[in-house]
Image: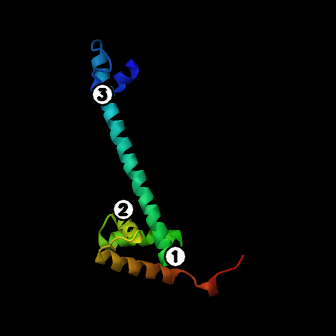
């Protein structure tokens, strides 16, 4: 239990001071704070990635386009509407879940992007069967 308490920055010094231990204590506290911040950032990134992946799935189904094109659609909408990709994805998921549609500018860019990538997709006459 003493070891765990020593690792908690709120429980006081990790090491007793003297002979350079105070400096090591300060360094360890800084490293702990840096790692906690990095961990929080990674958690946000994983959550954001999951939201974008789900939105790609919605665009695949509704736009009838492959996943790589659905990714491009989201990217294009984000860039052309000047909205963060994660936010575009959240708006699409909200709409797919029965909520409000995305803002008008995003809807317009979404239609245009899906149409753009649908045109680039070869039709059945161009596909090769096995």
Q: What residue do we see at 32% from left, 72% from top?
A: 100
Viewer-side residue, 35 vs 59:
59
In the rendered view, would you say 125 is above or below 36? below
Q: Position of residue 66 (x, y in %)?
A: 54, 72
Q: Quadrant of residue 97?
A: bottom left
Number of marks in the image? 3
Q: Position of residue 48 (x, y in %)?
A: 39, 56
Q: Position of residue 109 (x, y in %)?
A: 35, 77
The quarter of the picture where the N terminus appears is top left
For residue 125, side relative to residue 65 (left or right): right
Q: What residue do we see at 35% from left, 23% from top?
A: 5
The tag on residue 9 is 3
Sooner in the amino-acid sequence: mark 2 or mark 3: 3
Specify how the rendered protein is coloured: rainbow
For residue 110, side relative to residue 22 (left or right): right
Name the residue furthest front: 98
Label 3 crowding class (10 Å Cα cut-off): few <14, some 14-19, many 20+? some
The residue pinned by badge 2 equals 86
For residue 128, side relative to residue 56 (left or right): right
CA separation in Å, label 2 and label 3: 33 Å
Sooner in the amino-acid sequence: mark 1 or mark 3: 3
Label 1 crowding class (10 Å Cα cut-off): few <14, some 14-19, many 20+? many
Sooner in the amino-acid sequence: mark 2 or mark 1: 1
Q: What residue do we see at 39% from left, 52% from top?
A: 45
The tag on residue 30 is none
Q: Quadrant of residue 6?
A: top left
């Amino acid at each position: 239990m003493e070891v765990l308490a020593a690792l908690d920055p709120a429980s006081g010094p990790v090491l007793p001071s003297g002979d350079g231990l105070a400096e090591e204590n300060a360094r360890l506290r800084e490293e702990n704070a840096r790692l906690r911040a990095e961990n929080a950032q990674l958690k946000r990134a994983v959550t954001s990635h999951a939201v974008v992946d789900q939105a790609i799935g919605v665009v695949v189904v509704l736009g009838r386009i492959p996943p790589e094109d659905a990714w491009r659609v989201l990217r294009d909408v984000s860039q052309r509407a000047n909205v963060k990709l994660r936010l575009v994805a959240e708006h699409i998921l909200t709409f797919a879940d029965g909520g409000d549609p995305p803002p008008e500018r995003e809807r317009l860019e979404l239609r245009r992007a899906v149409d753009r990538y649908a045109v680039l997709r070869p039709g059945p006459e161009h596909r090769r069967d096995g």
